[in-house]
Structures are given as C-alpha cells and as structure tokens.
Image (cartoon, helix red, strand yellow):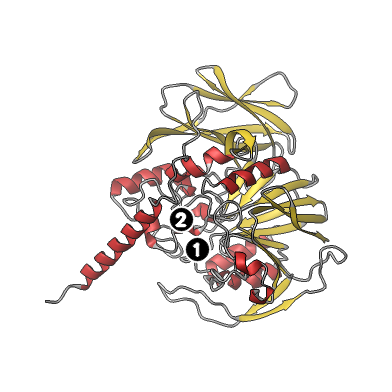
C-alpha cells in the first residue's frame, strides 16, 4: 500500500508540534514560583512605556503607555505633569481592545499617549480609574541630540531565572535612558502567557531587589529586536501557528515601536504565512494592527545616534534588493547622527560553537561599512563577546532559492588589532558585540577560558557570569562597559570620533 506524500507531511508536522508543545511544558520551563505580578486596581499588566511609532526626535517629545486590565467597564484616563510641577495635564483618552486569548482569559489592551514632553526632562504620569488616581510613575522623555545619554543592551533574558532578576536589578541601578533587547525577549515561544510569567513580573516588579527584579519598564523605554524564540521558534514555521499558540507572536501586540521598516506582507517574501483557524488569525491581526509584520524591522533616533533594529531570523533574505535598498537608504539618511548602531538577534560574527555556523547576517557587512556603522549589537549566544574592529568581504554567492537557508558565509576579514579602546580609541572597522547573557542558561562557558576555540576576529569572550552592556554617549565619545549580575566590571572600552 502506498501512503500519499501528504500523509507523511502531516505526520511530520504533527511530530514537530508535539515536540514543541512538550518543550514548552517541560518542568524546566514551567516552575512553581512563576506567578504573574498582577497589581491591584484591576491591572493584569501594570503600565509600561514604549517608544511608539515615533522614529524621529521631536520637540516636544511623546511616548506611548500600555497596560492591561480584566475588563473595560471602568473609565480610564491619563495625566502628565512636569517634574516638580503641581498641575496635572490631561491626555487624550486611551484606546482599548477587548480580547480573549485562550489560556489567558479575557482582558483589555489599553494604549495611551504621553505628549508635550520636554526632550530629556523628567516628568510624572498617572492613571485614573473612574476619576480616582490608581497608578503613578516617574519617567524621562527621549534625549535630544545635544544631550548625553546612557543605554543598556541585554538579550536572551526572559526565563524568570534568578540571574535574570539580578541583572534586571543591576540595570535599574545603572539608571539607563533606554534599554535595547537584541532578541529572545521571552522563552520559549514568544507567547503572552510567557510574558506574564517571565517578563512583566521581573521588569515591572514593585520592588528593586536582586531576588525580584525592578520597576524598570514603567519608567524606562525598552526597545527590542525579535529573536527566534520570539517569532520564529527555532526556525520552524509553527511559530506562526495560531492554533498551536493562540497567544503567540506577542511581540506584535505587546510592543509599540516605529513602523518605518520595509513593507512586508504575511505569506509573501520574508514573512512566513500565518497558520490556524480564521477566527484565530483575525483575532491576532486585529490586536496587532499595522505592527504585523512590519514592526520587525525599524529605525529610530535617540540623542545623537541613529539606531536600526533588524529581523535576522532564517526566513529573512538579506540579499533581497528591496530589503538592502531600504537598509542602505535608512542609514544614509542619518546624515546628522554622530553615532550609528545596529541591533539584531543572530550574530554574523561570534565564536560560540553552538551558533557559529549561523553567519547569514554577514551579508550586510558591506552596507554597515559603507554607511559607517559604529557598533552592531547581537544576542542569540548566551554570553558576552567583543570582536576586533573589522572589515569583511563575503565570497560572491547567489540568492537563496525558495525554502533554502543560508548558514555559512565564507569570506575574508581585515582586523584592526591596534585598537585597544584605551590608548587607541579610533577603530578602523565595525565592532560586533554579543550581549546575550541576560538571564537564560549560559553557553560557551568552556570556551571562555580556551582562546584556541575562538575565531580570529574575537577579542573577548566572557561566560560566566550573566551580564549586560552599558553604553555612555557624550558627543563624540562612547564608553562601553560589560557589567555582571553582581555589578562587577568585566570589560570596558572607549571609542572617540
């Protein structure tokens, strides 16, 4: 008897689904101490700040405020006042979407706007329920080009681990102006239910302690690239299966970021097709709105820097002329920026043997170099790595065929070994930083002390401990430090222009 090929495909897909489901329900991923940090006053998710669809600096500035409640019967309003002022200024009425996501129950997703903010100045905001104040926080508007600023980079974090909470507390102590996450925001599948246990309680904790985390996201803007565990689930198309994960793809409705990336369409080039019942798809698309799928690639300005955030997952073809033109034009348009940074998940240059072969993002090296990118920040490998400043020329290759995955990208590199970031602070080439030690289990630990396993382009490789990156920018000077979960300095270098 001949079994039709479609039967084999269905069985194979079922096996993949079962394997992923078992993985997501394993004891290692669901622990007794994982409880959502719901506050009083009807909050399911307490308020947190986002950049919103605001790529450019403005005066006055504005930010987006998100929160979730159980129902929408109450009347919610938002007010803002300058630091030290007495008078509260009412903001536009928040927008709300009522949705029931299986496994999470009914809830209302609120979006409010904080407007009229003086660049770089602190302010207070509060939420009122039925005209009674129920939540208040202190924050700061985005810095202008003339102001110094500090940002933190930390990836591969959302596991609700003790190191994640320790790192969050140290980030809070560092007082960054914003935090950038180079992917794998939550494990294992980017679901709302995982954010509820592994993200919101740690980064919006009511207390700042090493064993709880810190009240970060209510006062500090986070921006993020989408990692494989956020929207690609280890390179398997089931990440877009809304029957398997009805609360999946949380990146597109829990984050509000600029929509100035290349136009993408679900099911067409560079965007896997959504899978699942029509009702599941329509519910997700209504909740995500214009953010899906466009928000996976975007850029924004902060201070005197232009920052580009990219989707580096396997389905992205960065040899696609349309994508490359968008990236080149976006970086070229930042004529007034003194600094240019790029952030994405999977590094093109790293020495971790577990992910070394994933080199496809090397294909963008020529654009980074032409457009004078200073530093590229990545995650994916759960450790800290710093490259020498480098130039890379990939071997000529054709575009991938449909369904083909690009992994190894051979080529030649030229390293600036004279740069030490101390006495010589003028690098010749792009620096590549991996900062993926934010909370998930560390990798490459045996390699850190074995330099013979490093690639030629790697200057530093640190694991353990868990750690994060701080970047201090003051006009033409950038100071980068790597700090441990205990606050110890692991690495430091300076770049000057």
- Which quadrant would residue 178 be assigned to in this image? top right
The answer to which quarter of the image holds residue 135 is top right
* Label at residue 231: 2
Q: Is residue 488 above or below residue 462?
A: above
Apparent side of residue 307 relative to residue 7 in the rendered image (left or right): right
Where is residue 447 drawn, in percent x and y? 63, 69
Which residue occupies 52% across, 70% down? 320
Instruction: Of the two numbered discs 1 and 2 on the same chain, state the one appearing first in sequence.
Output: 2
**Percent coordinates x, y for residue 264 in the rendering:** 47, 58
Q: Report helix, strand or loop for mark 1.
A: loop
Please state the total of marks drawn on the protein image: 2
Disc 1: CA contacts within 10 A as few (<14), some (14-19) or many (>=20): many
Q: Are marks 1 and 2 in contact (CB under 8 Å)?
A: yes
In the rendered image, residue 51, in percent from the top left (x then y), is placed at 61, 43
Asked if one can make out residue 7 in the rendered structure from this viewpoint, the answer is yes
Q: Residue at x 61, y 67 (%)?
A: 446
| Disc ID at residue 313 | 1
């Amino acid at each position: 008897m001949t079994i039709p090929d479609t039967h084999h495909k269905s069985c194979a897909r079922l096996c993949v689904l079962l394997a992923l489901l078992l993985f997501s329900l394993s004891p290692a991923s669901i622990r007794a101490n994982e409880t959502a940090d719901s506050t009083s006053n009807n909050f399911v998710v307490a308020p947190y700040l986002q950049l919103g669809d605001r790529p450019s600096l403005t005066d006055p500035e504005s930010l987006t405020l998100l929160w979730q409640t159980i129902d929408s019967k109450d009347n919610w309003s938002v007010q803002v006042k300058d630091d030290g002022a007495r008078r509260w200024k009412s903001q536009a009425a928040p927008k709300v979407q009522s949705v029931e996501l299986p496994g999470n129950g009914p809830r209302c997703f609120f979006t409010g706007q904080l407007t009229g903010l003086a660049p770089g100045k602190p302010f207070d905001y509060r939420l009122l329920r039925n005209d009674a104040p129920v939540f208040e926080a202190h924050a700061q508007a985005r810095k202008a080009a003339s102001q110094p600023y500090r940002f933190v980079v930390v990836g591969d974090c959302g596991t609700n681990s003790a190191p994640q909470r320790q790192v969050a507390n140290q980030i809070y102590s560092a007082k960054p102006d914003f935090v950038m996450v180079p992917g794998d925001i939550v494990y294992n599948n980017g679901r709302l239910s995982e954010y509820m246990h592994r993200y919101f309680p740690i980064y919006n904790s009511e207390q700042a302690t090493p064993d709880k985390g810190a009240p970060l996201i209510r006062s500090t803007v986070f921006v993020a690239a989408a990692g494989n565990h956020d929207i690609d689930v280890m390179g398997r198309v089931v990440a877009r299966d809304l029957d398997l994960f009805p609360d999946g793809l949380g990146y597109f409705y829990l984050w509000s970021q600029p929509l100035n990336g290349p136009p993408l369409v679900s099911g067409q080039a560079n965007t896997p097709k959504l899978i699942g019942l029509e009702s599941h798809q329509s519910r997700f698309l209504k909740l995500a709105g214009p953010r899906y799928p466009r928000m996976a690639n975007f850029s924004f300005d902060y201070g005197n820097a232009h920052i580009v955030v990219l989707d580096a997952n396997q389905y992205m073809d960065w040899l696609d002329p349309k994508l490359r033109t968008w990236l080149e034009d976006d970086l070229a348009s930042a004529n007034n920026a003194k600094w240019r940074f790029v952030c994405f998940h999977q590094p093109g240059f790293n020495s971790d043997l577990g992910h070394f072969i994933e080199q496809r993002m090397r294909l963008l090296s020529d654009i980074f170099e032409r457009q004078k990118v200073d530093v590229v920040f990545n995650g994916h490998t759960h450790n800290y790595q710093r490259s020498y400043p480098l130039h890379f020329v990939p071997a000529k290759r054709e575009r991938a065929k449909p369904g083909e995955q690009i992994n190894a990208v051979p080529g030649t590199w030229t390293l600036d070994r004279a740069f030490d970031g101390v006495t010589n602070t003028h690098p010749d080439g792009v620096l590549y930083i991996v900062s993926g030690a934010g909370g998930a289990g560390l990798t490459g630990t045996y390699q850190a002390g074995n330099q013979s396993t490093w690639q030629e382009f790697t200057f530093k490789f640190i694991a353990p401990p868990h750690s994060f990156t701080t970047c201090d920018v003051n006009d033409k000077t950038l100071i980068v430090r790597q700090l441990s979960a205990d606050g110890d300095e692991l690495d430091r270098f300076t770049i000057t222009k």
